[in-house]
Image (cartoon, rainbow, N blue to C red):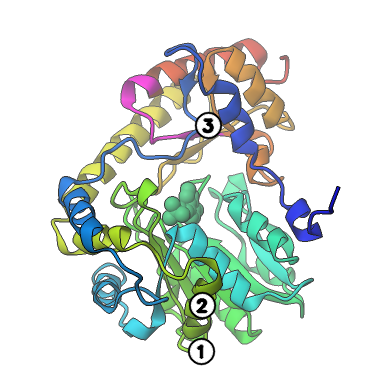
Amino acid sequence: MPELAPTAAAVQHSGIREIVNMVIGRPAGEVVRLEIGEPGFSTPQHIVDAGAAAAATARYAPSAGHMALREALVRRMARVTGVDVAPEQVVVTQGGVQACALTMTALLAPGDEVLVPDPAWPNYEMIVDMLGGRAVRYPLPAATGFVPDPDDVVARMTDRTRVLVLNSPGNPTGAVFPRDVVRALVDAAAARGIVVLSDEVYDELIFEGEAAAAITLDDEHVVAVHSFSKTYAMTGWRVGWAVAPTWLAPTMAKLQEPQLSCIPDLTSAGALAALEGPQDAIAVMREAYRARRDLCVELITAAGIDVAVPRGAFYLMVPLAAGVDSRLAAIDLVDHGVSVAPGTAFGDAAGDHVRISLASEEPDLREGIGRLTAWYAATEGGARR
Ligand SMILES: Cc1ncc(COP(=O)(O)O)c(C=O)c1O
């Protein structure tokens, strides 16, 4: 049999999919699904209408995206983060994930190191592996509410480090990094010529505190990654964008050519309508997530489990007994009627936590957390499974 490329073979499957694959197709109600990170909200109708209307005249777009959309994104950056950027710095991508992949494709040579949070959304490491780079993890300790210690991150920087990944508000933790932490990390990276890939796809889903947009702190070393998926409930549209320094953005746009040519015109029209139409759906979703967050924290705390209260995004990490293997726990929990994402899917540091997603509706959250806390009590946090 012909051989696979070593970089392709090195990419690991997502540890969340293992659980998803176990529960898909089970009869309704048998397993309450709390492992998925996909908003249940529908895409607002004016966005759907704009996408449908564009279908008849859809053509190729410029590699970096239509100028009208990039200009609308410039206005959005000013409105949400207060930063002035040029349309030439904006590259429209196929979701936030492709903005991350483009950034790293433009920067990494084989063997280069990328600092990745631990725990983190698994795709960062998959991208690094796919490019033959090396992911070096830095801890987000549960004890600090999953906020990194800048000195600890700096201690892991070497002369092979090309990229530092920040993700605030964070998946899977819901942590929102304070501005002084973001500033210390951006300054340290910039001083060493390291690019900060700041994944801010949840920046409009913050319950308390303020997002510190890294790009407001340095315009030569920061790539901001954004998405329509979460903010406008457009996961299936596959559209996001990157804002990159002027020395980098044209290369990222060029790299669209061998991969996508450009994003689809239908998606582009929907994205423009999302930016230019009413914004009230965002606040409605944010308030729904906040209410679900409050409910979950209350139910879990009432069961005697201490959680770090998430301040943004729509995830909550539940600690198991110290040292418990969350992958085995998550498999066991499926047999007890609830599916969660194991902390092991996100790295090592939170290997004894499980993530629940607030994307699920309130009745499911009540029922699922009831099953989770009953299991927790019966097994002493998974220690006596
Ligand atoms: C932290 C983080 N970044 C990026 C993404 C990518 O989202 P999309 O590619 O749908 O824009 C996700 C999706 O779950 C995420 O959790």
Q: Quadrant of residue 275?
A: bottom left
Which of the pair 121/118 is nearer the observer? 121
Q: Circle 3 — which element?
A: loop
**Residue bearing mark 2:** 252
Residue 138 relative to residue 298: left or right: right
Residue at image location 68% in from the left, 72% down from the top: 154
Q: Quadrant of residue 354?
A: top right
Whichever of labels 3 and 2 marks the residue nearer the N terminus, that label is 2
Label 3 CB-ligand 1 distance < 8 A: no
Q: Please tell me whether residue 173 belongs to the stretch shown in magenta.
A: no
In the picture, the disc for residue 306 is 3
Residue at image location 19% in from the left, 47% down from the top: 281
| Rendered location of residue 64, percent (x, y) | 40, 76
Q: Amino acid at mark 3?
A: Asp
Q: CA distance from mark 2 to mark 1?
A: 10 Å
Q: CA distance from mark 3 to mark 1?
A: 46 Å
| Rendered location of residue 12, percent (x, y) | 71, 47
Q: In front of the other: label 2 or label 1?
A: 2
In the picture, the disc for residue 247 is 1
In the image, residue 147 sits, relative to residue 364, either above or below, namely below
Residue 270 relative to residue 247: left or right: left
Q: Amino acid at mark 2?
A: Met
Q: Quadrant of residue 185?
A: bottom right
Give neighbour class at mark 3: few <14, some 14-19, many 20+ (Cα, 10 Å): few
Which region is colored magenta?
355-364
Whether residue 5 is visible: yes
Residue 15 relative to residue 212: left or right: right
Whether residue 216 is visible: no
Q: In front of the other: label 3 or label 2?
A: 2
In the picture, the disc for residue 35 is none
Q: CA distance from mark 3 to mark 2?
A: 43 Å
